[in-house]
Image (cartoon, rainbow, N blue to C red):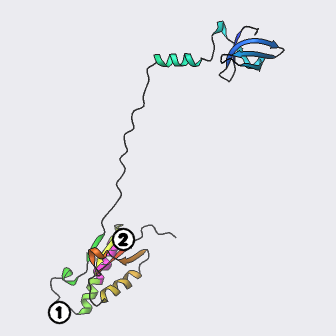
Amino acid sequence: MIKVGDFVSVLDEPISGKVISINGDEITIASNDGFNMHFMKNELVREESGNSLVPSYEEVQKNLQHKEVYRKKPKRPIAKPKEKNVPAMEVDLHIHKLVKSTEGMSNHDMVTLQLDTAKRQLDFAISKRIPNVIFIHGVGQGVLKEELRYLFGRYDNLRISDADYKKYGLGAMEVYIVQNPKK
């Protein structure tokens, strides 16, 4: 039974105080913070010998000073995987790089060998998921360059452009292989 002068705490809220008046089922308390508050009788519980069930701010601070403070370990930086900045694969199609001697070879034989080498290297790059391939065709009459464009045009998921002029001049083309084509 709660009576005037008792110390009470509010159920489900961090409020406690001293009962200053009772009017039927409504009880007025003077909270520990100095406010007069009205509650129903069933929302309050009487405290034994004036000990508040809800500790005051000062009590909490005093208890924290006596307890050992645990600090979180500093987070170590997570090693991020380095971006795959793989240099482009280079395929030199100059005929003297492909055979020891062109003796007995016609122009048609030479271009066919160069195209077969280009096709084989491109298929290798696609199978190994190499994103960029530079085909060095050289500067001449432009026959090999046009044949390469025709060959690469038969592939899906390829983007063809001139290679870096500073590094290769006009005699090379870069093929970018699109790895995950959108359908």
Number of residues whose C-alpha sits closer than 10 Å to that of mark 1, classed few (under 14), some (14–19) or many (20 or more): few
Q: Quadrant of residue 53?
A: top right
User: Outermost residue toward the top?
Assistant: 49
Residue 86, compared with residue 28, is above or below; it is below
Q: Which mark is residue 104?
A: 1
Residue occupying image coordinates x 38% and y 80%: 152
First of labels 2, 1 by sequence position: 1
Say whether residue 154 is left or right of residue 25: left
Indicate the position of residue 11 as horizontal and vertical percent values: 69, 21
Q: Quadrant of residue 174?
A: bottom left
Which amino acid, mark 1? Gly
Indicate the position of residue 13 as horizontal and vertical percent values: 67, 23
Say whether residue 41 is left or right of residue 143: right
Which amino acid, mark 2? Ile
Assess whether residue 11 is covered by the magenta stretch.
no
Task: Find the magenta span and give its range.
Answer: 115-124
User: Outermost residue toward the right?
Assistant: 24
Between residues 146 and 55, which one lies in front from this camera angle? 55
Indicate the position of residue 39 as horizontal and vertical percent values: 76, 20
Spatial CA distance of label 2 from label 1 is 33 Å
Q: Which mark is residue 126?
A: 2
Residue 84, compared with residue 35, is above or below; it is below
Assess whether residue 119 is covered by the magenta stretch.
yes
